[in-house]
Each structure stands twice: as C-alpha cells, then as structure tokens.
Amino acid sequence: MAQYTRVSGSVGLITLQNPPVNALSAAVRQGIVDTVKRALGDPKVKSVVICGQNGIFCGGADIKEFGTNMSGPPLVPMIHAIEAANKPVVAAIEGSALGGGLELALGCHYRIAHSKARLGLPEVSLGLLPAAGGTQRLPRLIGVPAALDLITTGRHVTAAEALQLGVVDRVAEHSTVDAAVKFALSVAAKSLDARRISTYPCPRPSDFDALFEGAMQKVRQSARGAIAPVACVQAVRAAATRPYLQGMEREKELMATLFTSGQARALQYCFFAQRAVSKWNMPNGARWDTSKPRPVHKAAVIGLGTMGRGIAVALAQTGMSVVAVETQEKQLMEAKQAVSGMLERGAKRRGLTPAALHKISYSHDIQAVADVDLVIEAVFEDMALKKKVFQQLSAVCKPGTFLCTNTSALDVDHLASQTRNPELVVGMHFFAPAHVMKLLEVVYGPQSSPQAVATAMQLGKKMGKVSVAVGNCRGFVGNRMLKPYIEQAFFLLEEGATPELVDRALEEFGFPMGVFRMSDLSGLDVGWRVRKGDGLVESGSASGQPTRLREGRRYSPLGDLLCEQGRFGQKTGRGWYQYDKPGSRVARSDPWFHSFLEEYRARHGLVARRIDHQEVLERCLYVLINEGFRILEDGIAAGPEDIDIIYVFGYGWPRHRGGPMFYAGMVGLATVLERLEHYRQAHPDVPYLQPCSLLRRLVASGSPPVHRWREVIKKLHSQL
Ligand SMILES: C[C@H](O)[C@H](C)C(=O)SCCNC(=O)CCNC(=O)[C@H](O)C(C)(C)COP(=O)([O-])OP(=O)([O-])OC[C@H]1O[C@@H](n2cnc3c(N)ncnc32)[C@H](O)[C@@H]1OP(=O)([O-])[O-]
C-alpha cells in the first residue's frame, strides 16, 4: 500500500506502507502507480517526495512473492513512469534502500538519505541480479567499476559512502522527510532533463576489457560455482556496451536465467532460514517470544587461548565491559598483546578508534569475575579441568550469573551438575576465529532455563553472530554431523581415493576447503586427542582386519598413523599434504603420503579401485545428511533450517546449495535414501550409513518440501 498526502502546499508525499521493511509487494506496487498518477495529475502539486513508513524506505521486492504467481504492476514500467515524470520526484531514504528499493530511488530525480541509512543492491546474495534497472542505471550514475563492486558483492554502503560515490545527492542528519520536502520545494521549477539517469551515457572505462576480464575472474574464483555473480558482470557489461533499452533487455534475459534456478531457491531459503533460527524453541515448549533475556552489561572470559582471545574481542566490540582471566602469567601477557592487536586492527578496518581496548580488564585471579552478569569458559578441552573451573565459578560468581562453556563436544549437563544453579548453565560454542566466524551454537540441557537460552541468544545477536539454539549431545549439531563425513573420507582413501581427489570433489561442489585440507588447517592432533579419549587409538604396529574394527564398527587408523609420525598438518609442515615449512598454508601433494597409502593398503589387504567425484559426494554428504535426520529425530535441532544455517555459517557449506538438509530435498529424499542403502549394503560395518527412520518416514509420506518437515517431525515426537 502507498499513502498519498499533499504537504507544504505543493508537495505530493507518497509513503510506502508494508511493515516491517515496506517490501514492494503487489499491493505496494499498485499503490505507487496510483499515487504517482495522482500526484502528477494534481495541479497544486509541483514536486513529489517518496518515503517509507516506520523509518525505513524500502527493503526491495517482496521475496515472499518469488515462487508464487506474481500479480500487480511490474516494477520496470512503474519506475520508468516516475523517471519520465514532468515533476521532480525526490526519494527520502531512511533505514534501508535495498534491491528494488534502491532501484526505485534511482528512478527518482533526486535522492536524500539519512546519515544512518544503508543502501545497496544485494540481489546477488539471493541468487538474482538487480532486475528493475539497477544494472543499467547505477553504472550510468556512479561509473562502471563502482557499480560492478556494489552489484557483484551485494554489499550495503553507508549514506556517507553513497554520497561520496554519487548514489545520493544529500545526507540529512535529522528528519529526512522534512529535508526532502524542503528540497522538493526548492527544485520544483528546475529542469529534469539532466536528472533522468537512464538517459545518461554510460562512461566507458579506458581499461574496459581488462576491467571486465578481471571482474569475471574475481567472481568466478570467489563464487565457487554460484551463477548469479557471473550474470551480474554480464548485465553491467551490457550497460557499458549497449543503449539503455537494449541493456534493459539483456538485464531481463539474464534475470530469467536466474529467477527459477535451484541456486536462487537455495539462497532465498537461506535468507528466511537465517531469520527463522532466531525464533528458537525448546522441546519443553519454551520459546523465543515467551522467554525474556536478562541484560548482560559485564561479561567475563576464562582461559585466553586462541578461542578465549577471540571471544574476548567479540565481547568487547559490543561496547560492554569484559574481564579476561588467565591463570598462567606468561599466557596472560601474550593474550593481552594479541587481544589489543585484534581490537586495533578491527577498529582500523571499520575506521573507528579502538574504544573497545579500554573495555577489557585482565586478571589471573578467578575472583575478578565475582560481579559479572555472564561468564564464558574457554579453557583447554579437558573435562576434569572444565569441571574444576565450573565449581570455582559457582562459588565465586554473584547469584544469577549465567555460566556458559565454549566446549565443542563435552557434556554441558555434566558441567552444569558441578554448579549450585545448573539452570544458569548453557553452552556457547564459538567457531575459530571467534571474533570473525558468524556462527554460534547455543547449547541447552534439560536443566537450562529458558531465560539462560534467551540471554545467550540475545548476547550472540549483540556480538553480530548468527545464533542457533540446539540440544546437548556429543558434538551438538555441527561436529556430530562432521564425524561420519570425515570417517567416510578416510574410508575412501582406504578404497582407492587420494586426498587430492576427495578435496577436489568437495571444492568443486562449493566448499572453500576439502576435508583433508581442512584437517591440515585445524590440526590432525585435535581429532587424534578426541579418538584417544574415546579409547579408539591402538598402536600402529599391528596389521590386518582387526586393527580396522572397533566394537564391530569399521574404523580407519589412517589419521592416527600420521599423528604417530608427528604429521599434524600445517603446524608441522606435513599432514595429508606437504607444506614449504611449518605454518605455511599452501598445500602440495606429498609423494611420501601416496607411497605410505599404497603400503598401508597392501599391509591391510586392501585393493584400490577407481573412485569418482559422484561417489565422494554421495558418501561424504549423504552420511552427513543422514546424521542430520537423526539429530532432527532426537529433537536436538528443532528444524532443518537450524542445521542448514549451522553448516552454511560454521562449516563452509556453499550457501548457493542451501545447506545439507535443503540440498537433500533438492537431490530428492528418495535418491538419498536409495544411495545410503546402496552403500550400507556395500559397507555393513558402517552404522552411520544405516538410513535414519525419519528419512524413511519422509520418503514414505511423499518427500514433502523442506519447509513442511517440521510438521512431520512434530507428529513423530508427539507419537513418541
Ligand atoms: C527487482 C529487484 O531487483 C530484486 C529482485 C529485489 O529487490 S530482491 C530483494 C532485495 N532485497 C534484499 O535483499 C533485502 C533483504 N532484507 C534485508 O536485508 C533486511 O531484512 C533489512 C531490510 C536490512 C532489515 O533487516 P532487519 O535485521 O532489521 O530485519 P529482518 O529480520 O532482516 O527482516 C524483518 C522481517 O522482514 C522480512 N523481510 C525483509 N526483507 C524482505 C523482503 N525484501 N521481502 C520480504 N520480506 C522481507 C524478513 O523476512 C523478516 O521477517 P520475519 O522474520 O519477521 O517474518
């Protein structure tokens, strides 16, 4: 809807009305067409202002309409009518002008933005391109290089940068609409010939070919198989090589290739899934909208290793006071330096003064956290040590202090049982580097209070994290699914694959790093320590079948054998790959490992066979997905969106593939089930390949679309 009023005597004020972000739904588009006609037909009106209700201009096209039979007036002619108007039209931009919202503003003759406004064309992040003239008008207004940057990255710019780029004409510190009305009065009599962007020539950069080749190469490298960024470059190229109307035809053509693509559906699913996970609920019925968080003004971090330092930085960057505790004096001094460095670099990147530096106080005494509202424990991943810390915290902290653990796999309930108030204990599982990675798993146990979960989720949002609430179990959601994925990768090596082949298949699928390059980065010794803790590691000297079985389950000692030789990955310069020196990041094939693998197969009577990318993907991804279904069945994750957001934001699952559960729906649940059964028959000693009954149930009920799985899961749990 759009409301029309005449203000200041001669200004027609059009207000977009579609809360919360005034998206350009069919009704809003119709409203704009009607109100613009009215303003242009009203003799008293000399100029027009378009603004949005509730302090936000427009969040773009209504994404909820995509995939439906879209009705109502199309955007392109609607914006043309505004640009062709014989009265100046001024866009008053508050809050956000994104996608179709900015394209609407680019159709106006002037743009005035509030100093806090954000502007951009983020369509690429939805698997699309700006299809209401954005790819043709923006290059004409701000030049090809700047337009290429905004359109291929989809990044939002501040009002200040938008002014500097020439996207907006003015920036207002207060009441943008008033400023726009005053401005509209001042330009009422001015000619509009030079204000219709589509009539502008598109400046042709001197290094035209090099620029577009460079842009195409860049998007192909960073896109990892995503198609929208490539189409964005092609559309902007049309702006620089064709007259406006032909360029618009090209924009339309390219959008048609994207609009119904699987990638666009996956990316739009991620958009809504990211918002859905903030609406958390627990099996005991507690929910996001009925559980009130408690404010956290002062927080503490216990243990200043790599994770603790990142968490301290992320907390301080919220502007709250932070107490950082490390009992080892030397480690404390090193941590102080490291944290200060990270804060200074962070502030510099954002063009800010490192005010957060003064928000952190350091101590080697746990007594220093007595008055904080929330503590995050990040000491070494050892249960005995963590239990001791939780006992101390329970004694030292003021009543009501939330006690959170950054453990990545240990039992949160067991730690809670070490305290006087287990209801105040939750897991806050960050991902390395903690001040960079967006994902946060908030882990609740049966005793965790809804208020503790609500407080941790709110703190996560304040730290700029995408927080997902999950139940307590071994490895929570992310690491629990990673275990069978890694196990299959090891088995594939035994059967004939190489680290290079497995990694190439996963990287071509879209992962930034394959499983073996990732293992070398995070360190083979991390997993080795956990397997030792689980009593799985045996001495390397023995050979034959028995050494590859643990309680009747197939087991591959490959990783253990490498660790016994000190091959921990990048940190030792040798792992699954070789590196120039310890700490280098460039992986190179290692002839030693290839002959070691052949000798290993011979020693264990294994005959290598040809393995193709399809088998790698099916075995590594379907077994991970299958564990995802078990997690849903166990109620550890409330819905597929929770799992998908965890994998997209924490494990490098390519966003244009929607996440493991969405991907399973795209491939077809029946196919996933059939392939798992196929591999289970071939490998009866691998229980992870046993299809989950929830998967069978979904296939039996006709493989409903992913957004309807929660109903099936609910029914399943109600029958349990
Ligand atoms: C032709 C044209 O070229 C093309 C084709 C297009 O234009 S494609 C569209 C391009 N536009 C975008 O990519 C912008 C997408 N939106 C955002 O980036 C953000 O929303 C925001 C504007 C910066 C506000 O952030 P926020 O943190 O304050 O609130 P929120 O929680 O995110 O959002 C609040 C609520 O609004 C919903 N919502 C937001 N934007 C929406 C949109 N464009 N369409 C439909 N719903 C939308 C969202 O799902 C949530 O719903 P619910 O969860 O409450 O039920």
Image (tube, helix red, strand yellow):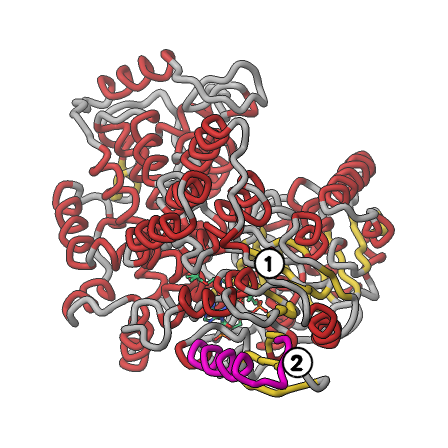
Within-10-Å neighbours for mark 1: few <14, some 14–19, many 20+: some
Q: What element carries label 2?
A: strand
Q: Is residue 16 above or below residue 545?
A: below
Q: Does the residue labelled 2 lie within 8 Å of ligand 1?
A: no
105 left or right of 249? right
Q: In front: 467, or 18?
A: 18
Residue 150 against residue 376 in the figure, above or below:
above
Q: In this view, does 668 lie above or below 590?
A: below
Residue 290 x %, y %: 56, 84
Pointer 2 local density, CA inside 10 Å: few below 14, some 14–19, many at least 20: many
Residue 350 shows in the view: yes
The secondary structure making up most of the magenta span is helix
Q: What is the quadrant of residue 692 in the picture?
A: bottom left
Q: In which quarter of the image is residue 89?
A: bottom right
**Residue 679 pos. (x, y %):** 16, 44
Camera sees residue 453: no
Q: Mark 1 points at which residue?
A: 195
For the residue pair 639 and 166, the one nearer the viewer reads as 166
- Residue 120 as seen in the image, left or right of residue 187: left
Label 1, label 2: how far apart the Cα atoms are: 18 Å
Residue 475: horizontal and vertical position, in percent?
46, 53
Question: Magenta span has 220?
Answer: no
Q: For mark 2, what is the residue?
A: 11
- Give the residue displayed 20% in from the left and 53% down from the top: 672
User: What residue type is disc 2 on?
Assistant: Val
Magenta residues span 29-48
> Helix or strand or loop: what does disc 1 sit on?
helix
